[in-house]
Every structure is written in C-alpha cells, then in structure tokens.
Amino acid sequence: MTSETYRDAFGIPHLRAADIHALARAQGRVTALDRAWQLEVERHRAQGTSASFLGPGEVPWDVLARRARLADTARRCFAALERRDPETARWVRSYADGVNDGLPAGARRAPEFARTALTPGRWEPWTPLAVWLSTHLLFAGFPAKLWREQAIRHLGPDAVGLFATDGPGTAGSNGWLLSGDRTATGLPLLAGDPHRFIEDPGVYQQIRLACPEFDAVGLAVPGVPGLPHFGHAGAVAWGITNAMADYQDLYRERLRRAGSSVEALGPDGRWHPAHTHTETLEVAGEAPVEVEVVETERGPVIAGGPEASYDPEGADGGALALRYPPRVTEDLGFSALLGLLRARNVIDVDRALDAWAEPVNVVQAADTDGGTLHRVAGRVPLRARANRLHPVPAWRPGHDWHGWHEMPYAAVPDGIAVMANQRGPAAPLGVEFAPPHRADRIRDLLDTGGRWSAGEMAAIHTDTHLASAAPLLGHLTALDGLTPAATRLRESLLAWDRRMAADSTDAARYAALRGAVIQLLAAQPVFAPLTEPPAYPEALRPWLALVPRIGFALEHLLRAEELYGIDRPALIRQALEAVAAEPPTGTWSDTHRLAPWGALPDGLATPGLAGDHDCVLCTSAVPGLTDRAARGPAARWVWDLADRDASRWVVPFGADGVPGSPHHHDQLPLWLGGELAPVVTDWNRLTPDRTLEHPA
C-alpha cells in the first residue's frame, strides 16, 4: 500500500497510511518537502553548527548549544528510548527516514539553499529529539536566575517580587476550555493561541495524520513527529500553555586544571574529575572558533571555565553549570506522543501525559462524552528554594535534586477553565508568572457570552483591552501644574477605552507615555549597577537587560508603596510633558509592527498590529525599547468536540515554507484580521497530491 497525501484549499497536508510507521515516514517526507530550509536550520541549531552557513551572528547560539551538550543529550535520550519504548523509537526513526526521503526535493524548491551554498544533510533518528530540546531549552527561563541574583545583590531581596513578571524571552499562551454546559452544542469547546517568537516559516505546521489506529488534525512542530501540543483526534482534543514552571538549575562551579584534565569542587569538599573536550565551530566567512566543553556532576558548564573564578561582588560571573532534566534522566518524554494520538478520551490523554517530560505545560483536554481534563504535565525536580531563585554554589551541600514534584490537577469550575501563564495549578512549581490580566479578561468575556459556538471564539482571541494600563493612568489623575498640552493629553488618555486597537491614536499615545516612563525609570541612579550585567554568554543577554525588565515589570514598580526613593509623580509628569510636546502623529499600528525572525530575513512581512503584551491579543513588543513585536500568536485554534469540521485554525503565514509559493503567506490576511480557516476532514473535499506517494 502507498501512503497518501491530500491538500486542502490552504495547502495544508492531510496524510493517511497503512500503519503508524508509514504515517510517520509520510509526515517527515511532507514536512521536508514543504519546510526543507526550516528543518535544516533547526537541525543545525540543535547541533550548534548554524554559523557554518549563516555566519558569525549565529556563533553565540552555537556556542551555547555545544556547551549545553544538546546533541549529545538527544543521542542519549534516543538510545534510552530504544531500550524503554522500542515502538516509539521506531516511530521516531520512521519520521527521520521520511525527512531524508523528502529533503532533496524540498531543497530544490527552497532558494535559501543556493543562497547559502548549503547542502542538505542527513537526519539521524535522534535529530527530532535534538530539535525538540533546542526549541525548548529556554522555555523555563533559567537565565532569569542571573537577573534575580544581580537584582538581589544591588536592590535587596524585595526586588524579586517587584520584577517578577513574564520576562522578555519567555514563551506563553492563552487557552480555555468550555464544558458542554457553556456551549451551543452541549459538547465541550477548546481554544487557544500559543505565544512564541513569530518566525517565517512558522513554528507550527497544520497537518492531519490518519491511519487505522487514529485520525488526528492539529499543529505539529516541524522536525518532530506527531501532534505534541495541539490536536483533535475526533473523540478527544487537547491543547497546552507554558506552565511557567522552574525545572532547570544553575550552579556556580569552582574549577581547576589538573594537567590536561579539569576538576570541580564538590559539596563534599573534594575535587572531582570533570568531563572535558574541545570542539571546533565553523563560521562562514571567518576563522573557526574553538569551544571547550566541560561537564561536572551537576551538568554542562555553559559559561566561564577553569580560569573564571567567582567574585561574590559580581565583577566576574564565574563558571556556571546547567542542570536540566533530560540530561539527568535521559528522557525527553517522547513516549507521550503516540499515546496522545491514540487517545479516545480524556482518561487516555491523562495517562499519556504521565510520560511527558519537558517543557512543563498546563494541559486542557475534552472528549465527546463530555469529559474534561485540566492538569500540569512534565518533570520538575524537588530541591532547595534557593535553586529556584538564583545560581547556587556547587561546592556547598543542600542543593542537590531529590525526586520529582507530583503534577497538580485543577477543576473546571462553572464549566470554564482558563490558562494564560498566570498563577494557577502550576503555582507551586514556579517563581515568575504572567500577570493575571489575560486570564481574567478571557474568563470575564466567556462569562458574559451565554452559550458559545466555535465560530465565536475569534472574538476572544482578538480582544485588545489592556488592564495593565491602570497603574500608569491612575498616577495621571493626581498630577497638577501641567501645561495645557499635557493637560489635554492626560484628559485624552483618561477618557481612552484602554483598547490597543490598531487604528487607535490614544493607544499610540499611551504607548509613547509608557515608553518615556520606562526610560526615565531606567535612568535612575539606583538602577545604574544593573545597566552593566556580568559578562555572561551573549545568548543569555535578553534576560539581563534593564530596560526590558523595567518595561515588563512596570505595573509592579508603579504600584509599590515605595520605590527606592524615586519620585514617581515627578518622573511621570516629566514623561507626560515630553510626550505632549512631541506627541505621536499616527495610530498604534503605525509603530506596532510585526518583526518576525527568519534565518535569512530579507523580505519578511512587517504589517501593523493591534494588541499588546498584556492583552488577550498578545502581540509583544519590548516597552521602553521598541514597539515592534517579535512575539505573538504563533497559531490560533478552536477544537469543537461536537463536530470536528466546525473547528477552526490559522497560522501567521502559511503551510508552505517556500517564498513565493501560493501557500507561503496566504493565511496572513486571516491572521491579521482575526479570522480562522476551516478545518476540513472530508477526504472528498481534499485534493490528492500525487507527488508524495511512496511505498509504505
């Protein structure tokens, strides 16, 4: 039998095959045909070899990937998967084989290969695990521990709470579940939108996977088999958000050279051998870079080395080892993936998620019997609280891992469950969470809407109300002695509906005022020591920059009873007068524009946007630094348990990763307009793609 590929009107692939292995091979093959460039960029990033064809700008990431031993961890995890779960290992191997089948033709379609003189490489069975690990390495935001350490050192322990917010590099999401009591059909609805860095091609791939065991539609991660995050298998559907859990630790290491080897001081007061070797990092157009890879009993050393001594005053960052669960357990949780596809009800989904490892997610699921599930899935170590807050000394006892947290569950009160990275069921597992505004707004909207249908969910996805504007606007009411221009600006902002609408001039003025306040706060002498963070790897610097930290924590900083002696009314008056003297002349979308990432960024679309960081329509800029949004909804989806064909989805660009192809950017108008494309599951309404037929 041959595996079959069909396409819908948006070029989305629908695959069916005789068994799970033929289907996995078909998924790898169609992904390679549609996304060859993206796949090869991700493979090289996971291996720390992307600078070899993209140039010196990728060196910081490649160095981090090498030092964190991502590829080696993926190899170990796949070897362990073969021992523990040979069926899933064979399934993953089939996917990699399919990628290798499709790469030659996919590379011929993709002009980027010729531009960079890149020859497609070979995918190994462990490559999908490496891509997964690379994609999610920074999801838990371990670099925030470096920021907290600096903030505590210079501002005191209260700074942890003041600056606790969804940081500049952390991925989030919205998601909500409605039980049948809340829907027009009497069966549950699920909906959401993952907030990621927007990339072109997109980080999610719409796809359908069908074989005798299951028939599921959903959003795949290019380079990884199955539908790990969002899927609708007919009788059951699921979706996730980032739980904001803390499951990675940083250890300060005392290292020394002992001849040709390296030793690390352990908590027992003795020096222990550390693994060490040197790797050569090729760089297009420049000389190779030598990378010393060191690993202690805690984990790989990602910063510093034997020559970097720890200075408690912070003048030198010292050597830092990263401890992360897959390196410890040799398990990336891939045994959950087939279980999700085979699920027939929420009990099956729950059972499958017991094997989930990372990233740690809040999961919602529902089935056609009316069952619902709201739980956290993943692996979070039990250890001292200090480990969760900041780097801890490897040479002192009390910072080891001793087991794993039990994953929390939550109810679905009043038929509604909302997840938006706020403090919820995952609260015991994390340190920093998103403000509650998105979650509160979604619940309020759902509570006022009667019985909902799938087609009405787009109104929730695109809501632009900005509750976090309240503290700054509240400060405006108490100002006196303003110039006439500043008085007019204040009155306009106080009358504003607090919606970050694309065509709103008041939203543009609010953003300008907010940016001015952030810049003035960042310039205060008390924060001066935080403007020059220690010399940590460049890839970690977004977490250490002062202006973004103040921007995302502005609400806390304005609400605090006292802020390090800063005269906030005078500062806000100064900002208001400055903006009133030179007010923005356009609308919010004139400056709030999409800034997607591309490995070769020429010609990427930069349309104007509505929304803001704390809106349900979460299009995240960096307040105080830029209005351009690098993050936003990487997909929107609605799963209808009453009728799968009533489900909806959309991605920012399109199904095809090849520039200029008909389906490269054909979903962008829908995404910008808040519309969703139909999910089509009737094979008779799909078009066969004969170019991808392949023996099973």
Image: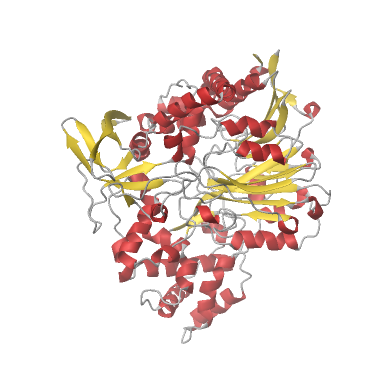
Residue in front for this viewpoint, 271 or 245: 271
Q: Is residue 659 left or right of residue 639?
A: left
Residue in front for this viewpoint, 583 or 689: 689
**Residue furthest out toward the left:** 259
Residue in front for this viewpoint, 159 or 336: 336
Residue in front for this viewpoint, 137 or 101: 137
Q: Is residue 265 left or right of residue 494?
A: left
Taking the spot 65% from the left edge, 44% from the top edge, the residue there is: 239
Colouring: secondary structure
**Residue furthest out toward the front:** 268
Taking the spot 52% from the left edge, 73% from the top edge, the residue there is: 471
Residue 58, quarter of picture: top left
Task: Kindly tell me whether residue 633 is visible in this rendering.
Answer: no
Q: Residue 279, image x and y in percent?
A: 29, 29
Q: Residue 301, image x and y in percent?
A: 31, 40
For the C terminus, which image quadrant?
A: top right
Residue 544, quarter of picture: bottom left
Please tell me whether residue 457 is drawn above or below residue 572 in the rendered image.
above
Q: Is residue 483 left or right of residue 687?
A: left
Q: Residue 333, image x and y in percent?
A: 54, 35
Count of picture labels: 0
For the N terminus, which image quadrant?
A: top right
Please tell me whether residue 543 is drawn above or below residue 355 in the rendered image.
below
Please tell me whether residue 403 is drawn above or below residue 576 in the rendered image.
above
Task: Kindly tell me whether residue 108 is visible in this rendering.
Answer: yes
Taking the spot 57% from the left edge, 62% from the top edge, the residue there is: 587
Please tell me whether residue 139 is drawn above or below residue 506 in the rendered image.
above
